[in-house]
Image: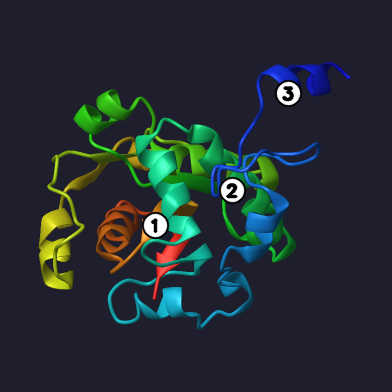
Amino acid sequence: MLSDFISLFFPRYCMACGNSLVKGEEVICLKCDYEMPRTESHEDAQNFVAIKFYGKVRLTDAVACYKFSKHGKVQKLLHRLKYDGKPSIGEFIGRKYGIELRDNGFSECYDLIVPVPLHKIKLRRRKYNQSAVFADGLSQSLGLPFSDRHLVRTIKTSTQTRKSRFERWRNVESIFEINYPEVLKEKRILLVDDVITTGSTIESCANALLSAGCRSVGVAAIAAAK
């Protein structure tokens, strides 16, 4: 009753389409949730996300919740998550996707969830790391701890948006370092990011984690581009 009264004066809107949310809906309306393009990559070990990393870095899993395309609802959601101060989007998707991953055995395959870090200057400006809030949502559903204190970005890089694959790789090569590597030794890490395009950032992060003594690294993202 109280929530109905509050929503009368402070209506909630779908972060994907802008329409009002009704009772039982959270962050994304049911229509958008149904229409958003899913990858189902967690059900196929040889999915298009995993193929991006073949011959580059050894990953136990590489999955994403949504297919990313320019000007689609997924891109709009990611833009609102990253630039409009809406961390609830990342946590919500993490909780929902975490249930699917849990049902596919991910809780038994990993020890710790680690988000791709932001540089401290960008983190100060944005107030939160979009990958970390996604990690928090996954943590709640998978029942696994997450930590953003071990993997750090030491160099502030330029945007990846208009770079070629080689330029993206050079842009993030050797910019990540590990804090407290003794804590990560022999740990099975689930590395998470908001969106995977060429995979160069993930490749650099995974190599840093494996070099620090992690037993294995898998990857999960909110979205991935084909």
Relative to 198, is 106 above or below?
above
**Which quadrant would residue 165 be assigned to in this image?**
bottom left
What amino acid is found at the position of numbered circle 1 in the picture? Val
For label 3, the residue is: 7
Q: 10 Å neighbourhood of mark 1: few (<14), some, or many (≥20)?
A: many
For label 2, the residue is: 93
Could you say where residue 144 lies in the image, as x and y percent from the top left?
A: 62, 44
- Give the Cα distance between marks 3 and 2: 22 Å
Q: 10 Å neighbourhood of mark 2: few (<14), some, or many (≥20)?
A: many
Earlier in the chain: of badge 3 and badge 2, it is: 3
Q: Which mark is residue 113?
A: none
> Dot 2 lies on which element?
helix
Could you say where residue 160 lies in the image, as x and y percent from the top left?
A: 19, 56
In the displayed structure image, the side of residue 17 where residue 57 appears, left or right: left
Relative to 165, is 51 above or below?
below
Task: Check contact, mark 3 vs mark 2: CB within 8 A.
Answer: no
